[in-house]
């Protein structure tokens, strides 16, 4: 951080003023004290305090000012040649130089960490990008909470893709494990979904393609050294056509979605569930779809285990279905915000596991006509991934 940029910040100006006042105060106190009282060594506080918030150049400036003050004290109290004053000046110079060196190392490592964090953040956002708020007749809102600090994504995943039929395909999944170690496994599923959402006609074929991709690539990216256990990904696939009120889903060991219809909440348990992806399911066995009604005005709540397994201080799991049932939010955005607030209140802090929540609303027909009369946004033709930011 440059001196000018630092001094523009209130905290920077404050620490420089305090350090300068300390130098002046200690110098005056030493000069007015008896000969046998030596307060000069306290001058090292000035560069040490500056180093706590400033960079090496400003710290060196305060260190030089402290050494100059010590020299002035020595001249006033018997001269520079006395052993005591020479020792004090030398010690203060060495300590100030060490403080400047430590400050320089800290700033260099801070720059390296900032660059690494920027690269990691870019890579994470490239993997999991925010979907638009509108996709065809659907309105979308989401919440993503990563388990590890300073990260935007972890082992949970979701993505949406517009198809040519026309319609929208959705995936939400949960990698066994959490945090950065699970990102590689999540990338396999997202990459396969992005490629297959447009290629495969049926949802069963798409699910089989995801299973094949995971079975082929999982061992290459799974963290088997630190986590030697079995690796798999639970997933829920949806196919929501623009026309009609019937949608399809394939559940691969994932928690059932919640359907909100006229403020009544129903858990859509799969009648033909499949094992999680990566459990070595035979490729010749076809995934079977379940059909459910998804009408205009309905909302779908898709979530991962990190939401419903979040515990209160007493050990109680978070009751997502109860919260969603009593919540009177009229839009996906407000519903996500209320659930997030209620979840944090239940746990007492942000959940410690990766957690993802995706809310999809089927808009009324007249609203669809109003929006489709406008030019379609180019992003609606692409696969768009979920965001690490909360709503």
Image (spheres, helix red, strand yellow):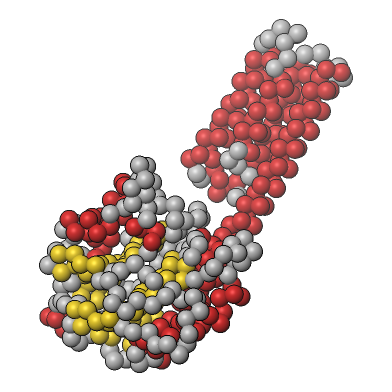
**Which residue is rendered at x = 55% and y = 35% of the image?**
15
Quarter of the image for residue 382 reads bottom left
**Which residue is rendered at x = 58% and y = 70% of the image?**
222
Quarter of the image for residue 80 reads top right
Q: Is residue 118 above or below residue 207?
A: above
Residue 329 as seen in the image, left or right of residue 169:
left
**Which residue is rendered at x = 64% and y = 20% of the image?**
26
In the rendered image, residue 241, in percent from the top left (x then y), is placed at: 25, 85
Quarter of the image for residue 31 reads top right
Judge by depth and name the residue closer to the eye, 180 or 23: 180
Residue 220 as seen in the image, left or right of residue 122:
right
Q: Is residue 191 above or below residue 335?
A: below
Q: Is residue 184 above or below residue 321?
A: below
Residue 89 as seen in the image, left or right of residue 161:
right
In the rendered image, residue 92, in percent from the top left (x then y), is placed at: 76, 28
In the rendered image, residue 223, in percent from the top left (x then y), is placed at: 60, 66
Residue 348 as seen in the image, left or right of residue 241:
right
Count of marks placed on residues: 0
Report if residue 378 is visible in the image. Answer: no
Report if residue 289 is visible in the image. Answer: yes
In the rendered image, residue 342, in percent from the top left (x then y), is placed at: 28, 51
**Which residue is rendered at x = 69% and y = 46% of the image?**
104
Name the quadrant of the C terminus.
bottom left
């Amino acid at each position: 951080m440059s001196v000018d940029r630092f001094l523009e910040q209130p905290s920077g100006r404050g620490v420089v003023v305090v350090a300068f006042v300390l130098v002046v105060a200690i110098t005056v106190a030493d000069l007015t004290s008896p000969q046998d009282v030596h307060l000069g060594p306290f001058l090292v506080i000035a560069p040490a305090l500056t180093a706590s918030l400033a960079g090496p150049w400003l710290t060196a400036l305060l260190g030089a000012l402290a050494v100059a003050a010590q020299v002035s004290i020595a001249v006033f109290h018997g001269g520079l040649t006395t052993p005591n004053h020479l020792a004090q000046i030398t010690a203060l110079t060495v300590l100030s130089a060490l403080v400047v060196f430590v400050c320089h190392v800290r700033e260099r490592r801070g720059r390296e960490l900032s660059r690494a964090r920027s690269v990691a953040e870019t890579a994470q956002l490239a993997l999991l990008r925010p979907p638009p708020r509108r996709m065809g007749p659907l309105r979308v809102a989401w919440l993503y909470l990563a388990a590890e600090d300073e990260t935007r994504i972890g082992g949970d995943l979701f993505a949406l893709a517009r198809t040519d039929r026309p319609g929208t395909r959705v995936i939400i999944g949960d990698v066994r494990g959490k945090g950065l170690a699970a990102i590689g496994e999540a990338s396999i599923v997202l990459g396969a979904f992005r490629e297959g959402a447009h290629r495969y006609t049926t949802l069963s074929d798409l699910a089989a393609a995801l299973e094949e991709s995971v079975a082929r690539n999982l061992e290459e990216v799974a963290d088997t050294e630190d986590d030697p256990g079995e690796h798999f990904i639970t997933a829920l696939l949806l196919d929501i056509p623009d026309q009609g009120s019937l949608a399809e889903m394939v559940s691969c060991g994932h928690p059932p979605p919640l359907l909100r219809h006229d403020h009544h909440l129903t858990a859509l348990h799969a009648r033909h569930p499949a094992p999680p992806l990566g459990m070595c399911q035979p490729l010749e066995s076809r995934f079977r779809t379940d059909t459910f009604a998804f009408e205009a005005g309905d909302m779908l709540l898709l979530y991962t285990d990190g939401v419903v397994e979040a515990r209160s201080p007493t050990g109680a799991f978070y009751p997502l279905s109860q919260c969603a049932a009593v919540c009177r939010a009229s839009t996906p955005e407000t519903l996500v915000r209320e659930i997030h607030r209620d979840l944090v209140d239940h746990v007492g802090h942000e959940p410690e596991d990766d957690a993802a929540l995706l809310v999809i609303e089927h808009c009324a027909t007249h609203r669809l006509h109003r929006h489709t009369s406008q030019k379609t946004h180019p992003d609606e033709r692409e696969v768009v991934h979920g965001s690490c930011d909360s709503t």
